[in-house]
Amino acid sequence: MSSKKVLTFEGKDITVVWDGNLCIHAEECWRADSELFDVNREPFGDPDLVDAEEADRIAKRCPSGAIAWRANDASAEEAAADENTVTVVPDGPLYVRGDLSIEGVPAQDGNTTKRVALCRCGLSKNKPFCDNSHIEGDWRDKGAVGREGPGFEEPGGPLSISPRKDGPLLLRGNVAVRAASGCIRWKGSKVSLCRCGLSKRKPFCDGSHKGEFEADGES
């Protein structure tokens, strides 16, 4: 597990947290049309320049869960997305959104119960989270999703994510998998997704991890 800086920006009405252990520098926060974050300012986060609605909007732009916000009187915080989705990023991680719980992983300062970027190349030093090691490792996958799932009756509900020891990510709960093309290709309530980077059926596990991949997780 990485141990990077976590910054807390406490304003008059709301508090915003940036967790460097989760950040993959997608640049969605500081490129947004907002005064909440400014990389040329010290400190670079200022919650007093925005209201709770804008803080929520900016936090939701962050695909890794590195940004979280809450009202100082505990009256409000980010709500989970209505539907659980996995987006397969070309040459990159899995972006997962919804009502999430990651089994066996310590709580983070960001908001991984709503948004998270999970490693699928097998190279991250901060598994199960992405740390951009796919870039240095020149790992490639176009992000196609070739299978269609059994579907589900109603979207939403809790989604549990279990990183299996030396194996895949096991997802339980209604979830839709979106290909890099932007189209939803797979829907179902249980799926094993590759996190070793070796599967020939990416993003799905095909057993290629056996004897070739080591990572902590649930047995």
Image (tube, rainbow, N blue to C red):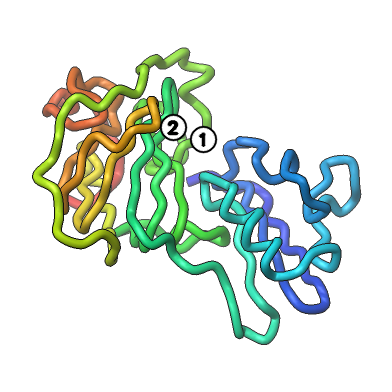
- Give the number of the disc on residue 131: 1
Badge 1: residue crowd in 10 Å (few <14, some 14–19, many ≥20): many
Q: Residue at x 83, y 50 (%)?
A: 44
Q: Dot 2 lies on which element?
A: loop
Rendered view: 51 above or below 171: below
Alpha carbon distance from label 1 to label 2: 6 Å
Badge 2: residue crowd in 10 Å (few <14, some 14–19, many ≥20): many
Amino acid, disc 2: Ser
**In the figure, is residue 176 to the left or right of 77?**
left
- Give the number of the disc on residue 170: none
Q: Residue at x 83, y 41 (%)?
A: 39
Residue 59: where, in percent of width, then height? 62, 56
Q: Earlier in the sequence, mark 1 or mark 2?
A: 2
Q: Quadrant of residue 206?
A: top left
**In the figure, is residue 178 to the left or right of 28?**
left
Residue 157: where, in percent of width, then height? 27, 66
Amino acid, disc 1: Asp
**In the figure, is residue 130 to the left or right of 55?**
left
**In the figure, is residue 172 to the left or right of 79?**
left
- Give the number of the disc on residue 124: 2
Rendered view: 37 above or below 14: above
Q: Residue at x 66, y 54 (%)?
A: 58
Q: Dot 1 lies on which element?
A: loop
Q: Quadrant of residue 167?
A: top left
Contact, mark 1 vs mark 2 (Cβ under 8 Å): yes
Residue 147: where, in percent of width, then height? 15, 29
Camera-nearest residue between 71 and 2? 71
| Residue extending furthest toward the left | 150
